[in-house]
Image (cartoon, helix red, strand yellow):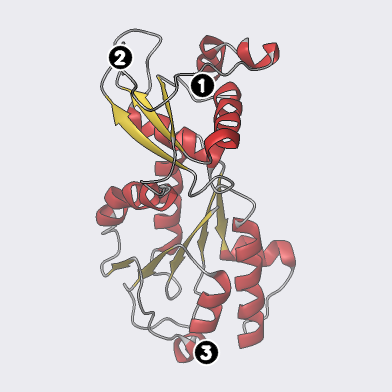
């Protein structure tokens, strides 16, 4: 799971940006959660704004976001300790206000360090919205050992479903690493509606984090033939799955996506 923190003083535009990020990521078909400070405090019936109360709030936000593939949280998160408790993968500081009407909050708010983004003008959220997808894609990307024995799995994956997942698992049981090549068949016909970015994210959704470090995803051309010469040094193998998995219909899954 990935945690996104939108922090800053009250009325700095946190909720607006958090909602915009949620709307941008929702089409990825990940499980995306969005949590606003006031609603979370209301649900917990905890209106303690002391240091201890704010640390409890950070822990609540952490726990809630961890229920999702991607969790988005907007709250003041005023101290380095509260930020450490939430432990954001992507942090955004709404530095659009230098003080608020709450003097206690102003006094305890510590300037954030090492944020992913800093927004200095309310409504100036475009840089975040333009780059947030790329940053999350990079976080999901799995690094493999390029000299280790590796299996190659080539397909259209329109979309990547549970049959493909089981195929990857069986492959990893044999080689411990797999390189997944997504054929570029996007929009060649009605059976290929999804581009590489969508397919890659669906693969990450199925494989991350349980198989992190054991797979990588790459875009390839529309591969239609695999050829080799004498003694190539690798095997070409078909892995059979249970009929319940081999009978999965990608066409029916695509209908559910519509």
Separation of marks 1 and 2 at Cα, in angstroms: 35 Å
Question: Dot 3: few (<14), some (14–19), or many (≥20) neighbours within 10 Å?
Answer: few
Front-lying residue, 49 or 169: 169
Residue 224: image x %, image y %?
A: 31, 11
Question: Dot 2: few (<14), some (14–19), or many (≥20) neighbours within 10 Å?
Answer: few
Q: Which residue bears the numbered disc 3?
A: 104
Which of the two labelled residues, at mark 3 and mark 1, occupies the earlier sequence position? 3
Residue lying at 61% horizontally and 27% vertically, measured from the top left: 166
Vertical relation: 222 (above or below) 123: above
Residue lying at 73% horizontally and 66% vertically, measured from the top left: 44
Residue 62: image x %, image y %?
A: 61, 65
Numbered badge on residue 236: none
Callout in the foreground (1, 2): 2
Relative side of 150 to 40, left or right: left
Q: Label 3 near label 2: C-beta < 8 Å?
A: no
Which of the two labelled residues, at mark 2 and mark 3, occupies the earlier sequence position? 3
Residue 149: image x %, image y %?
A: 44, 40
Judged from the image, the secondary structure of the residue bearing numbered disc 1 is helix
Vertical relation: 14 (above or below) 97: above
Callout in the foreground (2, 3): 2
Judged from the image, the secondary structure of the residue bearing numbered disc 2 is loop
Numbered badge on residue 257: 1
Vertical relation: 251 (above or below) 215: above
Q: Which residue bears the numbered disc 2?
A: 227
Give the residue at the far front of this rendering: 231
Is any part of residue 79 visible from this angle?
no
Judged from the image, the secondary structure of the residue bearing numbered disc 3 is helix
Callout in the foreground (3, 1): 1
């Amino acid at each position: 799971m990935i945690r996104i923190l939108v922090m800053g003083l009250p009325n700095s535009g946190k909720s607006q940006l958090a909602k915009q990020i949620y709307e941008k990521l929702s089409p990825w078909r990940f499980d995306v959660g969005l949590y606003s400070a006031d609603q979370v405090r209301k649900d917990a019936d905890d209106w303690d704004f002391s240091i201890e109360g704010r640390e409890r709030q950070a822990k609540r936000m952490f726990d809630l976001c961890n229920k999702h593939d991607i969790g988005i949280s907007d709250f003041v998160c005023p101290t380095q300790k509260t930020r450490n408790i939430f432990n954001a993968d992507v942090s955004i500081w709404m530095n659009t206000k230098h003080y608020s009407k709450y003097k206690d909050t102003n006094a305890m708010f510590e300037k954030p360090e090492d944020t992913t983004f800093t927004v200095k003008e309310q409504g100036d959220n475009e840089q975040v919205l333009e780059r947030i997808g790329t940053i999350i894609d990079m976080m999901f990307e799995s690094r493999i050992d390029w000299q280790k024995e590796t299996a190659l799995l080539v397909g259209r994956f329109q979309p990547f479903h549970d049959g493909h997942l089981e195929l990857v698992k069986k492959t990893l049981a044999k080689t411990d690493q797999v390189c997944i090549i997504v054929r570029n068949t996007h929009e060649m016909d009605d059976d290929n509606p999804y581009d590489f970015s969508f397919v890659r994210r669906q693969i990450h959704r199925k494989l991350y984090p349980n198989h992190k470090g054991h797979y990588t995803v790459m875009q390839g051309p529309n591969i239609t033939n695999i050829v080799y010469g004498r003694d190539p040094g690798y095997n070409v193998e078909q892995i059979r799955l249970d009929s319940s998995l081999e009978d999965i219909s990608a066409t029916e899954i695509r209908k559910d996506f519509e």
